[in-house]
């Protein structure tokens, strides 16, 4: 999320009652999770394995639980528990505020847009023109929907990110301050779930079509003109480029990148990023022709064994 | 869909401002998509690959984008873009008309049927006797439900077909004019989705049982006394005969035919039609015993390699 | 379910107009399905394959369709159709009683708990303090929810067990008399389904986190601090111990037992119980390192064949 107005290092550290290193007037313009950081952002890091990644990221303020050298042009804020300190900042700059009305008074709804019975619309929601929101859809807070978008019944847009830190005694939630952006001419099937970004935007690109019971995780970026068949599941922080086709029940784990025009056949599940323009199959997914050849080999080997054993 | 009253070739061509070949009084009694055409139907075809299939189908009027010889006893209507011309016909003969009421005034609901809170019922919906429609179910337009049917919460019946033509600039929807028919004594779990036919009927046969989160695509025919476990996905234009059992997370792609009494074990996914009376497993699915033997072979070969390498 | 007050053998047999063997004042303290029986329970059995199991189970009253020797300290009730006789008892002692109100007058809702618009709450529901029930959630009858629980939109809690007997002419339902128990600090994603026990309790252990579109079957026991990613499906009568992680689209068939700290990678599906503390992969699932080695072997063998054939 962007901070508006930007905060100074000093203000922010004071808010946390924390020590800091860097010019007191150093600006913090946003809060972000490590996968999406930009210049001006504050990021947190609490595990030695990720210290270097955070310090070398584009983030210019690092909330950290170790005394380290401050990289040039950056600033540090020290906290024993950066995860909790980050949550304190989110709670302060992005207070949660559930609306108990069926449609929040703050909702902006365009012309010729039809909101059917049983639809819930939370705070900070904008819906463009010529949309149809079918019965019993739920739109949580902080969702922006373009023009000519159709959302079918039972779908849930903007749930908080499924993002937890496992502590010995409980799962600790990273508070979400991100959004959902559904661009123009998107159609979302029935009983789909599209989670909001934990700190950035979950985006469904213009013209894309999602069939029923599709899941899109937090901060995931879906390109334009993608086609996802029913029961596809895409985890958080995934990037899917334009014109990608995912057939039924495909599963894409977090942090992967699927290139333009890629096609994943039904039930496939990549375990690493895939380049565009090819057709993939299998779990774990590989090029479809390779996978089909492997299956044929296994069938032949099995028959050969059987023949040998029966002699 | 059936046209009532039937239209003449001349009327229909005039509606499209299109040229035609055949007797002006030739009757068109229905509109249908190529998978489901019957005598009297108009079908459209826009790809050279499918010209012959359409011309030789049971359809007696073909909406086509090429000057071809008219088969005996049939008629042709010429359009540069048959897909769009067909949509024009659907729009004319089957205008969409969303009801904004919780329960449409046109709904016919049988005796002893319970409609729970939060249920939406659209236009042209008939529900038989002794049914229970649980809270927050959505029933779109053009759905017929028999007697003693139970539909659990969150399910969505009658969404338009997920059927698009990929154009360079956008996905173009084939407008749906089909229906959903749920026969007597069916039970549909929670958060299920059953799409309407694009031009025909999506049918759930009498006595069938669907568990939660099941997806049934457009124009698919499910036989009697079928049992589908949770998270099964069946695509469009599938035929599943009577007494078929699909265990959890099975996926059936479009246009396949699954024979009577077939059993598909959990997570299986056929890639071609399957004959009845057998048990199948795997993705792609094969006879379960073959698949299990293949898995055993692979395990043995892997162990043999390991032993060899460690010598 | 527990019977309150307990019934005598004589009373119960009279209710069924059935003959019995054993002391007329022998107590029946509960009704239970064979997977969950305890001392004092009545269980039914109608298939010779399961006679011994039922007679030797912890149940102390057996409803059976054969004259057998009565085990010491137990009692028998004879019925031609024990399944139907058992349903008669459930109907008598646990009559179904749908509430047509949005929120049943019998619901007990704790302090600081927020019930959002469109939520349905049935009879015999208790919700603790500090919970959030998001819009359009459906909570059927006989559900107990602890403190600090979050349930996201579209989820359906407490549907009857998907448990049928296939008769030649129809599927016959085993009537449910069980419950759902969601312990403290659980979070349930959007569009999840958690079925009630057929005769016992479906339990989600304290601190567990379920992502969107997760299915949990009847009588299943989920331990504490489990993490289930999106589109996981767990069938009925499964036991999952504490701290188990199931990644996206994992499927667990009925009656299995998954040990503490087990991790199942995405799309895995065990076909037998798994010991704890290990990581599993594949469908059918095995230890992840074995499965990965098998996949590598298959790839190598396929390449070797190809090289050989091209010579």
Image (cartoon, coloured by chain):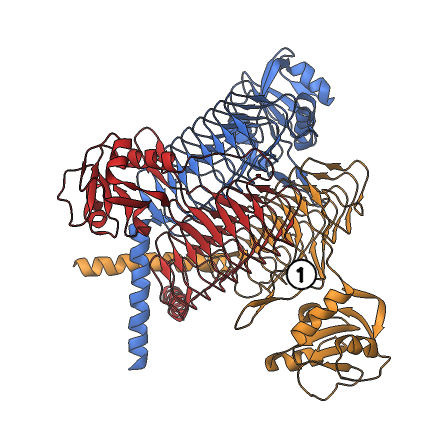
Chain colours: A blue, B red, C orange
Q: Quadrant of the C terminus of chain A?
A: bottom left
**Hey, which residue is sitting farthest left in the picture?**
B69
Q: As drawn, is A200 to the left or to the right of C155?
A: left
**Hey, which residue is sitting farthest top in the picture?**
A25
- Between residues B268 and C27, which one lies in front from this camera angle? C27
Q: Position of residue B253 (x, y in %)?
A: 38, 52
Q: Position of residue A126 (x, y in %)?
A: 55, 23
- Between residues B308 and A186, which one lies in front from this camera angle? A186
Q: Which residue is mark 1?
A: C219
Q: As drawn, is A200 to the left or to the right of C302?
A: right
Q: As drawn, is A125 to the left or to the right of A97?
A: left
Q: Position of residue C124 (x, y in %)?
A: 78, 52
Residue C87 falls in image quadrant: bottom right
Residue at disc 1, secondary structure: loop
Q: Position of residue B151 (x, y in %)?
A: 58, 52
Q: Residue at position x 77%, y 77% from top? A: C60
């Amino acid at each position: 999320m962007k901070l508006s107005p930007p905060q100074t290092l000093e203000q922010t550290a004071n808010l946390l009652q924390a020590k800091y290193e860097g010019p007191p007037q150093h600006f913090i313009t946003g809060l972000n999770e490590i996968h999406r950081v930009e210049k001006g952002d504050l990021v947190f890091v609490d595990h030695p394995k990720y210290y270097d990644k955070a310090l070398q990221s584009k983030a210019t303020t690092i909330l950290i639980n170790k005394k380290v050298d401050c990289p040039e042009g950056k600033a540090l804020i020290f906290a024993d528990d950066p995860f909790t300190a980050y949550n304190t900042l989110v709670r302060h700059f992005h207070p949660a505020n559930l609306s108990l009305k069926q449609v929040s008074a703050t909702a902006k709804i365009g012309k010729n847009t039809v909101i059917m019975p049983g639809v819930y619309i939370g705070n900070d929601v904008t819906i463009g023109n010529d949309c149809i929101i079918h019965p019993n859809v739920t739109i949580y807070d902080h969702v922006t929907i373009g023009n000519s978008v159709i959302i079918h019944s039972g779908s849930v847009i903007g749930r908080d990110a499924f993002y937890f830190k496992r502590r010995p005694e409980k799962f600790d939630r990273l508070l979400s301050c991100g959004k959902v952006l559904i661009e123009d001419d998107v159609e979302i099937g029935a009983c789909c779930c599209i989670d909001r970004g934990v700190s950035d935007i979950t985006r469904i690109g213009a013209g894309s079509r999602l069939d029923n019971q599709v899941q899109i995780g937090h901060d995931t970026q879906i390109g334009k003109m993608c086609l996802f068949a029913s029961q596809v599941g895409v985890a958080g922080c995934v990037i899917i480029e334009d014109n990608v086709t995912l057939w039924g029940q495909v599963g894409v784990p977090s942090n992967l990148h699927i290139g333009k025009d890629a096609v994943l056949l039904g039930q496939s599940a990549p375990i690493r990023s895939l380049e565009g323009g090819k057709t993939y199959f299998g779990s774990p997914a590989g090029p479809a022709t390779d996978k089909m050849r492997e299956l044929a080999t296994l069938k032949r080997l099995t028959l050969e064994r059987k023949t040998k054993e029966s002699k």
